[in-house]
Amino acid sequence: MRHAEAIGKHWCLVFVAYALLPLDCLPPSPTKGRLLLKTIGEAGRQQAQALMQALILSAHEQLQRGQQAVDLFGTLFAKQQTAMAS
């Protein structure tokens, strides 16, 4: 994030995530009450864990299909490698 445009995009994503996280804290039914089931911090940690789990399982599936680890890592870190090269 070295440019104003990238910083703006990052902040937009942060605000969208922060706006959606409370939805994950609500009870499944309006008749079960209005109290939050978990805090926003707990919801954020749960979503981060779910994201990491999905990434690991996806990488495992690709490796099982015969993709080479070096190619998989190249795909996963392509954006970082491009940024570090410039």
Image (cartoon, rainbow, N blue to C red):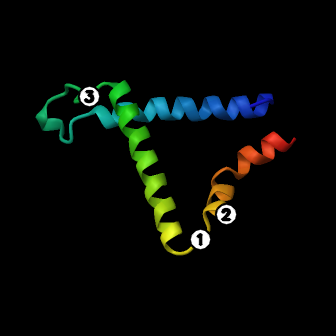
Name the kind of residue labelled 1 in the image: Gln
Left or right side of 65 for 28:
left
Q: Residue at x 48, y 71 (%)?
A: 64
Residue holding disc 1: 67
Which residue is painted at 69% across and 57% down in the image?
Answer: 74
The relative height of residue 61 versus residue 7 in the rendered view (above or below) is: below
Tell me whether circle 2 and circle 3 mark residues in contact (CB < 8 Å): no
Q: Secondary structure at mark 3?
A: loop
- Image quadrant holding the C terminus, namely top right
| Three-letter amino acid code of the residue under disc 2 | Asp
Q: Quick check: 27 left or right of 86?
A: left
Q: Compared to 14, does 56 lie above or below? A: below
* Residue 36: % across, % down: 24, 27
Left-right relation of 3 to 56: right
Tag 1–tag 2 contact (CB < 8 Å): yes
- Mark 1 Cα-neighbour bin, 10 Å: few <14, some 14–19, many ≥20: few
- Mark 2 lies on a secondary structure that is helix
How far is disc 2 from disc 3 in space, using C-alphas? 39 Å
- Rounded to the nearest angstrom, the CA distance separating label 3 from label 1 is 39 Å
The image quarter in which residue 46 lies:
top left
> Which residue is tagged 3?
38
In the picture, the disc for residue 71 is: 2
> Could you tell me the amino acid type at mark 3?
Lys
* Marks 2 and 3, the one that precedes in the sequence: 3
